[in-house]
Image (cartoon, rainbow, N blue to C red):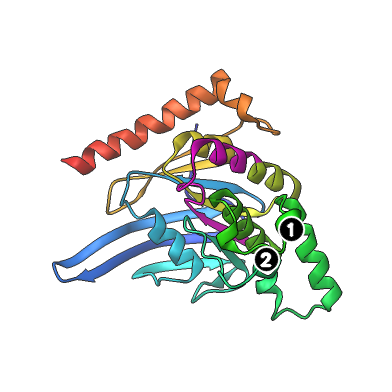
Amino acid sequence: MAGNTQGITNAMVKIKNVKKIYETSRGNVAALDGVSLDIQKNEFVCLVGPSGCGKSTLLNILAGLEQVTEGEVLVNEQPVTGPSSDRGIVFQQYALFPWLTVEKNIAYGLRNKKLTPQERNDITDHYIAMVGLDEFRKSYPKELSGGMKQRVAIARAYAVNPMLLLLDEPFGALDAQTRSQLQAELLTTWEKEHKTCFFITHDVEEAVLLAQRVVIMSNRPAKIKKIVEIDIPHPRTQATRMESQFVELKNEIWSEVYIEYLAQKK
């Protein structure tokens, strides 16, 4: 069923009437046109829509990597004006430091926190174990598969204990089997730690499997077309994909996305 873009009290994230216009050699290009969205603490929200509609632009604004043209973005009532360790980011490309081992990549964000060496080691050990890479802790990124690299990236984002975890197509470059495995691992982690997650994907099935709400973006300049509540109980597994409720929700969301895709082609 559809939800509202507004009205969640005490929301952790408040996106208020955000517009984003890029100045290009061909003139101004509007990417976002009046986007408003509230995200509650501990909520898992997925964002879907046609390619190029502005999904990554919205995530980059939340991350503080881009600025709004109009509107306002608040996290815990504080305006987002730039990057912060309170917002962890996982990109599609792994963005690991090639000269650091798995454990040192995961521990990298802890270097400026007021922690004892033992506390840093304990946190690093916890997240290495969480992503199942203990036997690879001394390995370098070049020695890892794509799936392993993305596990390291996710563990590094979690290790700094951000209020908000931003994931931009984190499994998009992976093969189907590895993607399914990492979806399951991310679900298990969220079910244990309930980190607030904002997850961009082109894969509607992935969105339904992971999210509590799926936000559907319109064709560019993007608005929020519809929000669909995903009231499938946890734990969710690969078998969940076969359930009639899952299939109905997937078809509902895909039909909305496909309409926007066709409009984009006109």
Q: Which mark is residue 106?
A: 2
Q: Is residue 181 magenta?
A: yes
Between marks 2 and 1, how big is the CA–CA gap? Answer: 8 Å
Q: Look at the numbered disc 1 and give the secondary structure of its residue.
A: helix
**Circle 2 crowding by C-alpha within 10 Å: few under 14, some 14–19, many from 20:** many
The single residue placed furthest to the front in the displayed view is 143
- Please name the residue shown 79% across and 72% down the image: 120
Q: Which residue is mark 1?
A: 127
| For residue 75, side relative to residue 68 (left or right) | right
Q: Amino acid at mark 1?
A: Tyr
| Residues drawn in magenta | 160-184
- Please name the residue shown 51% across and 51% down the image: 170
Q: Is residue 220 magenta?
A: no
Q: Which mark is residue 115?
A: none
Would you identify the image quadrant in which residue 239 lies?
top right
Query: Which is nearer the eye, 170 or 251?
Result: 170
Where is residue 14 drawn, in percent x and y? 52, 60
- Please name the residue shown 23% across and 36% down the image: 262
Q: Is residue 247 visible?
A: yes
- Please name the residue shown 61% across and 52% down the image: 148
Pointers 2 and 1 in contact (CB under 8 A)? yes
Would you identify the image quadrant in which residue 57 lies?
bottom left
